[in-house]
Image (cartoon, rainbow, N blue to C red):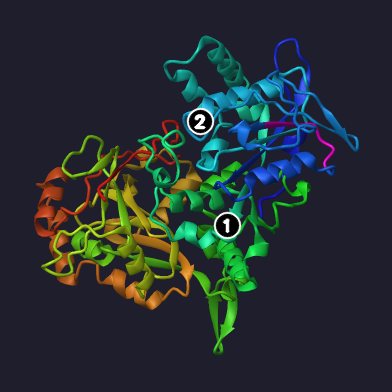
Amino acid sequence: MAPSKRSDDRTTTFKSRPGMGERKLLPVTVLSGFLGSGKTTLLRHILQSPDHGLRIAVIVNDMASVNVDGALIAQSNTVSAKTNKRDGGEIFVKEKVVQMQNGCICCTLRSDLLVEIAQLAWGEQLFDHVVIESSGISEPQQVAETFTAELTQAMIDAEGMESEERDTFTQVAELGGLKSIATVDTMVTVVDAFRFFSEFDTAEFLQDRFSKDEVPDEDQRTISDLFADQIEFANVIIINKVDVVDKHTLGRVRAYVAALNPSARIIEAKYSKVDVKEMLNTGKFDFSEAIASPGWLKSLHEMTVMDVNGKKRAAPKPETLEYGIGSFVYRARIPFDPLKLYRALEGKFILLQDEMEGDSDTSSTSGTGGTSLITSDSSSEEDEGRMMETHEILANKKACPCFGGLHRSKGIFWFATRPHQMGSWSTAGAMLTLGSEMPWFCTVSQDEWMADEETVSNIQADFEGEWGDRRQELVLIGEKLDSERLTKLFDSCLLSRAEMRKWERVMHDKTFSREEQNEKLQESWDDSYWAEWGQAEIGLEEEHHDHNHGYVRNH
């Protein structure tokens, strides 16, 4: 179900600055999408449209890339540009914009973005709306977080800020953050229907596709992960270039988008021609709902009850059923044998692992930061230790009966050798990222959960038996997934009954410290293929203030 319309946000007023009167919150629409998806064409369409009658300010990543008619955008570096009146509306364009050549507004330039929006909200010229065209490599969630009070304060606390910039931040913080003067109205993501599946079925990193000027060395994000992030966080998704794909392909694309983000408004378009009222002054974006979890995880609770061979069964919604697209949840209350899981995934995914900062045990050939990439396939003695080529891994995954149709998965997992840390699992296409974000709740006192009564109740609902909330819980989405085969595969990676008894004896031995428990368990089960995890602390709200895109690539 789509988020409720937050019309109150658009009528709320704020005291802009001392000596100035009250103003309405400035609504902001953010355009995201890969290079070539039609994002800039969409911006041009918004500016040229006579249908909105709004005074619009525009913040773009690279002004040179916006080939908009000079009659609409005045080439000016002043705070407000000339206006062009169309049917009672006026278009204002601010070319003094955040420059993206040396950073991205989702991380290094978020402070610049905050200042730009604050100046627009406080400026002498009143605007009805702001449209931000983010770069193709930006994560929309990070852009939206610029509006939170927490991020504003974190930036104030950071070193190296210019005094003038600090003054702006201080004034914004005193008002309660950027959200007190401006509001995210709509998050729009544009996807190219023709390239949709190739963006998932790739092993490319951003560095492989973009220049070093656009993507710094420390940014080791993958194309498929970023593509999924852009779809999952939006509340309006435009499937563009529908005229260059056949009806069946378009149906598959739409079904995948609906499965990944069931709450979003999905619009099909040619040449980015969309009703601008779907993107401006909608008041429908809800940050708290968007950040809670990917929509397709929520959709598991919104399955359709259908009659299958005379029996009632929960099934995906009809739009996904038509194209064989659906979700499957794997659950177990037994830990994985690390080596068995490694063998099950080996050669089928490019595996990126979060590792401890400064860990030098895992060899690397390029990059800096915190992951190791495992692509070797040692199915025969002759091939032992051979590093597989990327095209081999992609072909292996595509041919795999279990993972061939898998496009996205997310969840948590439990390693026998790491009984105190919750493993995090995420795939997008052939890229699989594993790491640890926090301890299992059962391993720390309830006082450390720092949660309200409702959250505590939800956490406790995951507890079962002696081992608390430790579990395997993986949600997989794809085309014609064989749930029985996947279950059998993952079950084969669990400890056997005899192994579980052996594991429990170690855990029951109170003479062992946690470190000694881990060492004892690693003597029994080979953990050497996996990078070490740092000791994370309980944190119910994900932090993005330092937003590091670094990885180690051992390809």
Asked which secondary structure carries label 1, the reply is: loop
Amino acid at dot 1: Asn
306 lies left or right of 529? right
**In terms of depth relative to the viewer, which is nearer, 96 or 172?**
96
Q: Is residue 236 above or below residue 57?
A: below
Q: Name the residue under label 2.
A: 101
**In terms of depth relative to the viewer, which is nearer, 75 or 9?**
75
**In terms of depth relative to the viewer, which is nearer, 408 or 295?**
408
Return the mark for residue 369. Answer: none
- Magenta region, residue range: 52-58
Contact? badges 2 and 1 (CB < 8 Å): no
Where is residue 411, by image quadrant? bottom left
Asked which secondary structure carries label 2, the reply is: loop
Picture coordinates of residue 15, whole percent (x, y): 72, 19
Q: Name the residue under label 1.
A: 261
Residue at 70 percent across and 51 percent down: it is 272
